[in-house]
Amino acid sequence: MTDTPSPAVPAPASASGSVLPSAPSTAAGLRDRAVWVFDLDNTLYPASCNLFAQVDRRINEFIAGHFNIGMDEARVRQKRFFREYGTTLRGLMVEHDVDPVAYMDYVHDIDVSGVEPSAQLTDALRRLPGRKIIYTNGSVRHAENVAGRLGILDAFEAVFDIAAAGFVPKPDPRPYATLVERHGFDPADACMVEDIARNLAPAHALGMTTVWVRGEQEYEKAGVGAGVHIDHTVDDLPSWLAAVAGATSA
Ligand SMILES: [Mg+2]
C-alpha cells in the first residue's frame, strides 16, 4: 500500500515462462470470460489522479504518530517494512502488533474528489458479461469509497480486501487461492487486471489470463519480462475494456 519502490523480483533460471509485454494488446475472445478480477489503486483509476500519493502520505503520518518520530525517519521505516514484508501494514503487524483496522481507517481517510468518473469504464463494465470482483491490498471501505466516486461500484459483486486475505498481501500466492475458493470460480476462465506486474504472477500460476495496466513506477514494472507472465499489456484500461466488451467472441 505504498508507492515506494520495492525490490526487483529475482529472475528465474529460465525465461521460458515469461512473455515480454510489447505493444498494447486487443483481446477479442476475452469477452466471455466468466470472472474478472480487478485491482483497485492505479488500475481502475489512473495514477495521474495522485490519489495514491495521499494514501502514501497518510501511511507515513501514521508511522510518525505511532512511533512519535519525524516524517523523514518514518519514511525510512516505511520503506524497510515495504521491502521486507511486501506491504507497510504487514511489517507493522508482524514487528509491532499494530491494529490493521485502525491503520486501514487512517491511511484511507483521503479526499477522492480528484478521481474523475469514467463513463467509458462504467459502460464497458456494464457490457462485459462476466462476474466482476475487486481484489485490493486495501480495505473494503477504501474500495467502496473510490469505486463509488468512479461510479462503477454497482458493477462488482464483491470486494476481496486485505482482511478477507487474512492480512496477507499480494503477491503472496495464498490469498489468491483463498479468493478463488471463496468466490468459487475456475481460474482458467478468469482474467486478472493489475498495475503491479509482479502481483500477476500468482494469478498466472493458477491459470488466469493476466492483464497488466502498464505502470511507470519501478515497483509496478519489477519483474516484467524476467519472472512475471503477462498475457496482455494495456495503457488505457477504459478504452481497452470497451474494445473487449464490444468484441465478438472468438
Ligand atoms: Mg494497484
Image: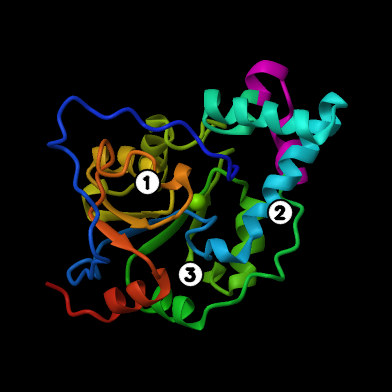
Quadrant in which the C terminus is drawn = bottom left
| Residue type marked 2 | Gln
Q: Quick one: SS at disc 1?
A: helix
| Residue 6, percent from left and from top | 50, 35
User: What residue range appears in magenta?
Assistant: 92-106
Residue furthest to the right: 68
Q: Which residue is mark 2?
A: 54
Would residue 128 be visible to someone looking at this image? no
Question: Which residue is depicted at the point 85% across and 33% down?
Answer: 65
Q: Is residue 93 magenta?
A: yes
Decide: is 232 above or below 206: below
Residues at circles 2 and 3 in contact by the CB criterion of under 8 Å: no
Looking at the image, which is closer to me, 234 or 176?
A: 234
Quadrant in which the N terminus is drawn = top right
Decide: few, some or many residues near mark 1? Use Cα within 10 Å; few <14, some 14-19, many ≥20: many
Q: Which residue is mark 3?
A: 155
Looking at the image, which is closer to me, 197 or 108?
A: 197
Q: Determine the CA span between mark 3 and mark 1.
A: 24 Å
